[in-house]
Amino acid sequence: MDKNSTDRIMEDKEAGGGGEVKYRGVRKRPWGKFAAEIRDSNNHGNRLWLGTFATAEEAARAYDRAAYTMRGSFAVLNFPHEYPSLSTCSSSNVENNNGIPKEVFEFEYFDDKLLEDLLEFDEKKTGK
């Protein structure tokens, strides 16, 4: 066996026996299927079996669902763009009827009390 073959075998063993997989929580089985599992921090780091899948992407999405359910916004995901934005507010410029840009803030996940306080503050500031 040459050095490159030995290196590939070592990489396969380190990756779980079935070859290199680029997704977090996914291992390729020797027969070609992909296994997904996640460490459960609530259960002393024990592995939680998520299933066996035909493609690495399916297994990675199963991992992402479990990670997001377990860790929420702190989860490290394979496909973070597929999950809701973790920011709580955003702003953009919108033109009013006169064509003058007006900054608009959009708030998410806040209770009614905060919204009422913000509206009262705006009314006091503008004198309406």
Image (spheres, helix red, strand yellow):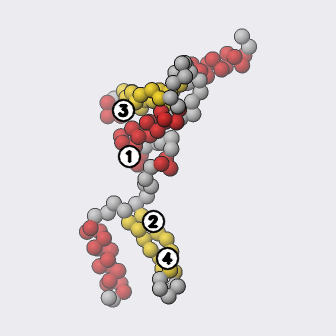
Rendering coords of residue 6 (x, y %): 67, 16
Mark closest to the chain's N terminus, 4 or 3: 3
Left/right of residue 95 with respect to residue 126 in the rendered view: right
Mark closest to the chain's N terminus, 3 or 2: 3
Kind of residue at disc 2 = Ser
- The residue depicted at 35 percent of the width and 84 percent of the height is 125
Mark closest to the chain's N terminus, 2 or 1: 1
Above or below, 86 relative to 52: below
Disc 3 to disc 2, C-alpha distance: 33 Å
Residue wearing tag 1: 72
Above or below, 101 relative to 76: below
Residue wearing tag 4: 94
| SS class, disc 3 | strand
Q: Nearer the viewer, residue 19 or 115?
A: 19
For residue 128, the mark is none
For residue 90, the mark is 2
Crowd tier of the residue under label 4, counting other residues whose Cα lies within 10 Å: few below 14, some 14–19, many 20 or above = few
Q: Nearer the viewer, residue 117 or 81?
A: 81
| SS class, disc 1 | helix
Kind of residue at disc 4 = Val
